[in-house]
Amino acid sequence: MAKRPELYTFTQISDSRGDLSFLEELKDVPFEVKRVYWLNDVPEQQVRGGHAHKTGEQVIICLQGTVEVVLESQTNERLSYTLSQPNTGLYIPPLWWGKMLFKGKAMLLGLASDEFSEDDYIRNREDF
């Protein structure tokens, strides 16, 4: 059975000094983290993504602002998520086409199961 997208809630410790959230690979995310990336200074209402991964898995976390995520499977199942809490991550398995709309000076952190390889990307929607 194919893997499905899933929301994860990470540990958050809050006090008068602020919030601390954390995660541990293979415990809080279902893979060994091989790459970390982030998106910031994305213009308001800008769409990012527009691709799928053949084998790579990801967890994305909105650290600031809001990111609207739309995922679509190869069978045209469409799922929508709103990420706006830094202790919430969205697991994106392989072969889910993703688009992300950035709002409110959003900052997104991504954890990936693989090192970067252009060969893992499906960038043409018709090839998906």
Image (cartoon, rainbow, N blue to C red):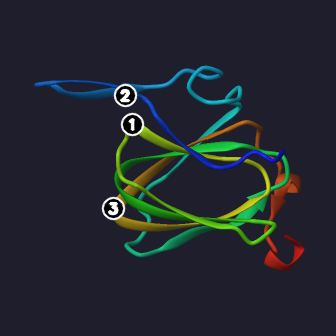
Is 16 on the left-hand or right-hand side of 42?
Answer: left
Q: Residue 95, percent across and down?
A: 79, 57
* Helix, strand or loop status at disc 3: strand
* Helix, strand or loop status at disc 2: strand
Of labels 2 and 3, the one closer to you: 2
Mark earlier in primary sequence (2, 1): 2
Q: Residue 76, percent across and down?
A: 74, 72
Taking the spot 83% from the left edge, 48% from the top edge, the residue there is 117
The circle on residue 87 is 1
Distance from the alpha carbon under mark 2 to that under mark 3: 20 Å
Seen in the picture, residue 81 relative to 19 is either above or below; the reply is: below
Q: Quadrant of the N terminus?
A: top right
Does the residue at mark 2 contact the one at mark 1 (Cβ under 8 Å)?
yes
Mark earlier in primary sequence (2, 3): 2
The circle on residue 105 is 3
Taking the spot 33% from the left edge, 61% from the top edge, the residue there is 105
Taking the spot 72% from the left edge, 43% from the top edge, the residue there is 57
Is 75 on the left-hand or right-hand side of 63?
Answer: right
**Mark 2, residue position:** 21
- Amino acid identity at mark 3: Lys
Dot 2, how many residues are within 10 Å of its Cα: few (below 14), some (14-19), or many (20+)? few
- Amino acid identity at mark 1: Asn
Of labels 3 and 1, the one closer to you: 1
